[in-house]
Amino acid sequence: MDANTENRMEALEVRLAFQDELLDALNATVARQQKEIDLLQQQIRLLYQQFRSAQPDDAAGGSLRDEIPPHY
């Protein structure tokens, strides 16, 4: 191999190493974000359940849409 080919090979190897590091970092970021999304979805489900359990029964008091807001 001549010097030019060796320089090009070395440059490609360096680029590949940087791309591998970047790919690992991106993979870790995606995995962390997925955990956060899962946690947020769980929290939303819990809040929704709490909201639904705090709602008055339709048979007992009607819908919240039928109530007059307090400023009237």
Image: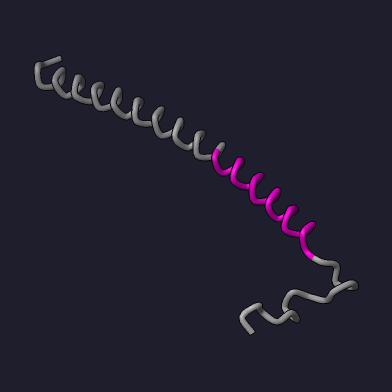
Q: Give the extent of the magenta segment.
A: 36-55
Q: Quadrant of residue 19?
A: top left
- Residue 62, percent across and down? 83, 76
For residue 6, above or below residue 66: above
- Pick the front one: 15 or 23: 23
Residue appearing at x 79%, y 57% in the figure: 53
Tell me: 2 left or right of 20: left
Instruction: Decide: is 59 above or below 25.
Output: below
Q: Horizontal and vertical percent for residue 31?
A: 51, 34
Q: Residue drawn 61% across and 80% down?
A: 71
Percent position (x, y) of residue 20? 35, 26
**Residue drawn at x 60%, y 41% as measured from the top left:** 39
Residue farthest along the bottom direction in this orientation: 72
Observer-nearest residue: 59 or 43?
59
**Residue 51 location, x and y as percent?**
72, 58
**Which residue is more in the foreground, 58 or 44?**
58
Q: Say whether residue 13 is left or right of residue 8.
A: right
From the image, which quarter does the N terminus lie in?
Answer: top left
The quadrant in which residue 22 appears is top left
- Looking at the image, the residue that sits furthest to the top is 1
In the image, residue 37 sits, relative to residue 66, either above or below, namely: above
Q: Quadrant of residue 65?
A: bottom right
